[in-house]
Image: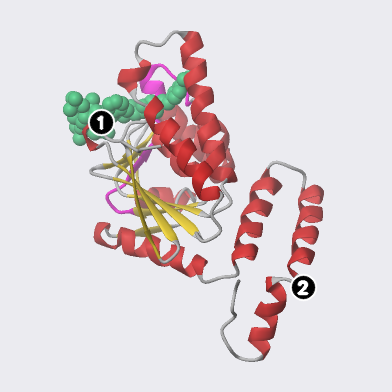
């Protein structure tokens, strides 16, 4: 598929994906969901890639779902639009590669829901977070009510969702919505540095960690622990053996 919105760049086993529709503040439209679904399916099949960094061109990461596209929708079309986005965002969570959001600017509504579907978030001090759907007489439609409360707790989630207030990156850091805040010029070096750090680790262990945390959040503690024992065991006699041997021999591990 040829992409109109997503621009990709690959270096050192890290794929950088830039959402590039700055005239509309990278607002999420049907085309975006189609391209992102295609991208996630294609990178999932590649064992040479180790991490993905997602960012936005211009003043926004994403300023929400595309209001111009949504305005003409009836209930049925609205539900379909919501289901389409939920499927895409779930695909990002289930993507075998770690996905880092490099949040460069406005990250509102569906944009914040997208960032929350990434594995963690690094933000520029220029970023502004918010869930302004109530201003439009809407609720979030891409599982924002569910992910936000799980990430920052019910009080912080309801504060953002009910007031529609925009908060700074520092405030988002305090809430636990982002994991790091850096000056704008350091955003991509920081995100890429973290992606490369992940790329240097045992690739099977990295993918297993993501699976375990993601699946664990959807299941019981005991079921999650049982999965962990299985994944942990599977790495013995595999890359875990090389990692431990390399440690004892005081040399860098050679991952396959
Ligand atoms: N959709 C479409 N176009 C947008 C947009 C958006 N979300 N945000 C900005 N734009 C467009 C503006 O219309 C403007 O277009 P032109 O007039 O130049 O043609 C251009 O981007 C530049 O925007 P501004 O002129 O407004 O730029 P400023 O710097 O003054 O302000 C801003 C930046 C981000 C603060 C402002 O644009 C803004 O407040 N934007 C809207 C933010 C917002 O309310 N986002 C949340 C959208 S609600 C559901 C499915 C999904 C959702 C809900 C339900 N179901 C199906 C049930 C999700 C909802 C949302 O995400």
Q: How many marks?
A: 2
Q: Residue at x 50, y 40 (%)?
A: 156
Q: Which residue is mark 1?
A: 24
Image quadrant holding the C terminus, namely: bottom right
Q: CA distance from mark 2 to mark 1?
A: 51 Å
Q: Which residues are magenta?
A: 124-140
Specify whether residue 135 is painted magenta. yes
* Disc 1 residue: CB within 8 Å of ligand 1: yes
How far across and down, in percent of the image, does residue 231 sit?
75, 60
Q: Earlier in the sequence, mark 2 or mark 1?
A: 1
The residue carrying pointer 1 sits among few (fewer than 14), some (14 to 19) or many (20 or more) residues within 10 Å by Cα, namely some
Residue 235's quadrant in the figure?
bottom right
Q: Nearer the viewer, residue 217 or 41?
A: 41
How far across and down, in percent of the image, does residue 46 sit?
53, 54
In the picture, measured across the screen, residue 57 lies left or right of residue 95, that is left
Q: Nearer the viewer, residue 41 or 87?
A: 41
Does residue 62 lie above or below 52 as drawn? above
Quick check: can you spot residue 246?
yes
Q: Which residue is mark 2?
A: 237
Question: Outermost residue, top direction?
Answer: 74
The residue carrying pointer 2 sits among few (fewer than 14), some (14 to 19) or many (20 or more) residues within 10 Å by Cα, namely few
In the picture, measured across the screen, residue 207 lies left or right of residue 59, that is right
How far across and down, in percent of the image, does residue 124 sit?
31, 54
In this rendering, which labeled residue sits more in front, label 2 or label 1?
2
Does residue 88 lie above or below 75 as drawn? below
Question: Outermost residue, front direction?
Answer: 1
* Disc 2 residue: CB within 8 Å of ligand 1: no
Secondary structure of the residue carrying tag 1 is: helix
Specify whether residue 11 is painted magenta. no
Colour mode of the rendering? secondary structure
């Amino acid at each position: 598929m040829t992409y109109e919105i997503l621009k990709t760049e690959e270096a050192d086993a890290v794929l950088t994906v830039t959402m590039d529709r700055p005239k509309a503040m990278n607002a999420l439209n049907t085309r975006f969901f189609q391209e992102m679904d295609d991208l996630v399916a294609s990178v999932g099949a590649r064992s040479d890639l180790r991490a993905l960094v997602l960012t936005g061109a211009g003043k926004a990461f994403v300023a929400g779902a595309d209001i111009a596209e949504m305005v003409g929708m009836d209930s049925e079309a609205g539900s379909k639009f919501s289901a389409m986005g939920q499927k895409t965002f779930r695909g990002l969570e289930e993507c075998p590669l770690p996905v880092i959001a490099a949040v460069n600017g406005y990250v509102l509504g569906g944009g914040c829901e997208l960032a929350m579907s990434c594995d963690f978030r690094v933000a520029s001090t220029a970023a502004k977070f918010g869930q302004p759907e109530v201003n439009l007489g809407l609720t979030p439609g891409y599982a924002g009510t569910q992910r936000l409360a799980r990430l920052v707790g019910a009080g912080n989630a309801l504060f953002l969702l009910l007031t529609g207030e925009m908060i700074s990156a520092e405030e988002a850091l305090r809430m636990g919505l982002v994991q790091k805040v850096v000056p704008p010029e350091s955003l991509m070096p920081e995100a890429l540095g973290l992606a490369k750090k992940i790329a240097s680790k045992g690739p099977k262990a990295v993918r297993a960690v993501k699976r375990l945390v993601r699946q664990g959040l959807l299941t019981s503690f005991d079921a999650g622990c049982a999965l962990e024992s299985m994944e942990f065991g599977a790495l013995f006699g595999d890359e875990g053996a090389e990692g431990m041997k390399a440690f004892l021999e005081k040399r860098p591990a050679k991952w396959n």
